[in-house]
Image (cartoon, rainbow, N blue to C red):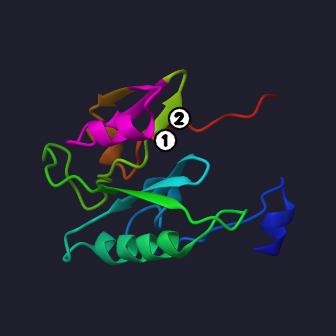
Amino acid sequence: MGRLLGWRGPEKIIWLLGIQGKDITDGHTDFYARFTKPGVVVAGYDPDPNSFDHAVTTRHLDILRAATDAEGRSLKVVVLEAPSDVREEYASDDFAVGYINFYVCNGTVIAPKFGAAKQKLRELFPEREIVQINIDGIAAGGGGIHCTTQQEPVA
């Protein structure tokens, strides 16, 4: 981790463990937790004790609630529960259902449309329009909006 701290200037890293072998990404962090502004992190939580994501999201919340920012201040952790109501058309073992994989751009937050996260996202991003879209085709492949909108370096 020391090498990461010296690279590109980060002063602190909060490490969230993945879930190797449980999904096709081994638990990419952009699916589980994202900073919405300094000191505020939104984290996904799967309340279903039968889901493989339940244990990892519970552990992530414990880590984040105990963490501090680079200045030693406690983080504000906002929880977004995993959607309980998913359309079955594309459902598979790799189907990535969650809200944290949103994309922030040009005065807007583009988020998956699985259920009732719009109000919580509006509270997290009051200056932005919240647009939810159906991403079932992307989620069926194990990804989300943020996965498909990765930045490309300028040549």
Is 66 placed above or below 39 here? below
Quadrant containing the N terminus in the rendered view? bottom right
Is 36 placed above or below 103 here? below
Q: Is residue 86 left or right of residue 119?
A: left
Quadrant containing the C terminus in the rendered view? top right
Q: Is residue 115 magenta?
A: yes
Which picture quadrant has residue 39?
Answer: bottom right
Which residue lies under the disc numbered 1?
Answer: 146
Q: Secondary structure at mark 1?
A: helix
Instruction: Tell me the residue at 27%/65% (across/down).
Output: 46
User: Which residues fall within the magenta stretch?
Assistant: 108-129
- Please state the horizontal and vertical placement of residue 150, each as a whole percent of the image: 58, 38
- Please state the horizontal and vertical placement of residue 74, each as a whole percent of the image: 57, 66
- Identified by mark 2, the residue type is Thr
- Please state the horizontal and vertical placement of residue 16, each as a whole percent of the image: 54, 71
Q: Is residue 139 left or right of residue 47?
A: right
- Please state the horizontal and vertical placement of residue 42, each as a whole percent of the image: 44, 53
